[in-house]
Image (spheres, helix red, strand yellow):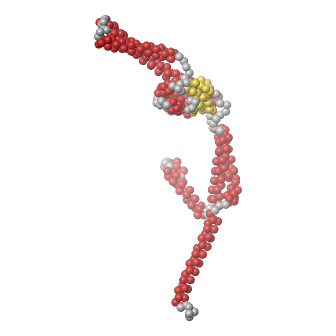
Amino acid sequence: KSRDRVPYKYVINIRKQLNKNSNLHNEKNKNNILAQSNQIQYSEEETVSLSDILIIIANQIRLIILTPAILCLFMVIYVQFFAKPVYISNAKIMSSDNKKPSQVGGIAAQFGIDLPNNSSEMQSIYPEILKSRTLAKAMLKRKFNTNKHGKNKSLFEILIPNYNKSKNDINTNRIIATDMIIGMIDIYVDLKSGIYNLNISAPEPEFAADFAKALIEELDLHHSNYNNARISETRNFIEERIIDTDKNLSKAEENLKDFRDQNRRIENSPALLLEQQRLLREVSVLTGVFTTLKQQLETTKIEEVKESNYVIVIDKPEVPLSRSKPNKRYMVIITGIVGILFGIFLGFAREYLRNADTKEKEKLTQIKSLVYTNFISMLPKIGFLRNFK
């Protein structure tokens, strides 16, 4: 400091350090500039603005309009001339023994269904009974009038009109018809009220209402037949028990009479008094059993001849005024919406193929060729396909 100068060796070190810092700073500036330019270029190339989308839609507006128009036209033709109409007849029914789980359980046992003791669970199982194969097979014999198949035709002839010409045997046709009947039935239960909403689908309105009425009658008939069979079995059992009880009672009364004939004075004998009480008790018990069985027999006979409706019809099936399926307006609207979306997709795909460069077109051509080749290779090697390839 006193000499007012810096030694040269320190000057060299300072210059090296300054040059090094200057190079690092320049390099950082260059990297920042490159990064910013790349980001700007990336954003300019990759981002798509709303105006670009609208331009593509405007260029492909003809395709976007024609696609839903053509699809809606085909849908209108289908629903107007080819779609089969479906009419639904509704009825509300209720079981007369909702509070008697044993009877409902007996009906379920007839159809091979084990019902629990819980009332709500039994109500949830009851629709399965209505859609059982046993009930469906019984419905095949019922006669109906239809506009297409004529009057007084069995349900089997209506569902399988060409069964005589069919290659399937009669059992196979019956299985097919049974499945068709089950498919025509829809039932929903209100667990709180125990009311069942029965919906029957059919190609004709009168046929739908008649089918619903016949199904309710068949259900009531099956219910009645089972209860009659159960009551008959109960009556036979009670009659057999009465015969056996009458024999035992007569024997017990004879034993008591013989005991009294052989023992005129038993006041001073505790053993004889005890034996007399035992004989009297046996006669009294058998007399009570015999009396109870007689009362049950009379009650069973009354139940056997009594007629009752086991299915309560709240709302009878009515002829539907209009068809429920298919909903023409709904199907055309849905087809139009799908057609617009599909048309927009085709428009963007067409615009992409138009603006794609040569390499992209080559890749797409290669993808098409690979898909075609692999698909043909999966098909059976028959002569027609080889010629087609």
| Residue 334 locus on image (x, y percent) | 65, 44
Q: What is the quadrant of residue 288 in the picture?
A: top left
Residue 150 is at least partly visible in this image: no
Which quadrant does the N terminus fall into? bottom right
Between 342 and 18, the one lying in front of the other is 18
Classify residue 51 as left or right of residue 221.
Answer: right
- Going 59% across and 61% down the picture, which residue do you hit? 361
Classify residue 288 as left or right of residue 139.
Answer: left
| Residue 237 locus on image (x, y percent) | 42, 18
* Number of numbered discs visible in the structure rendering: 0
- Going 53% across and 22% down the picture, which residue do you hit? 221
| Residue 282 locus on image (x, y percent) | 36, 14
Residue 344 is at least partly visible in this image: yes
Q: What is the quadrant of residue 34 in the picture?
A: bottom right
| Residue 338 locus on image (x, y percent) | 64, 48
- Going 62% across and 27% down the picture, which residue do you hit? 315
Between 167 and 387, the one lying in front of the other is 167
Query: Which residue ends up furthest to the bottom in the rendered image?
Result: 3
Measured along the vertical axis of the image, is residue 264 above or below residue 171? above
- Going 62% across and 61% down the picture, which residue do you hit? 356
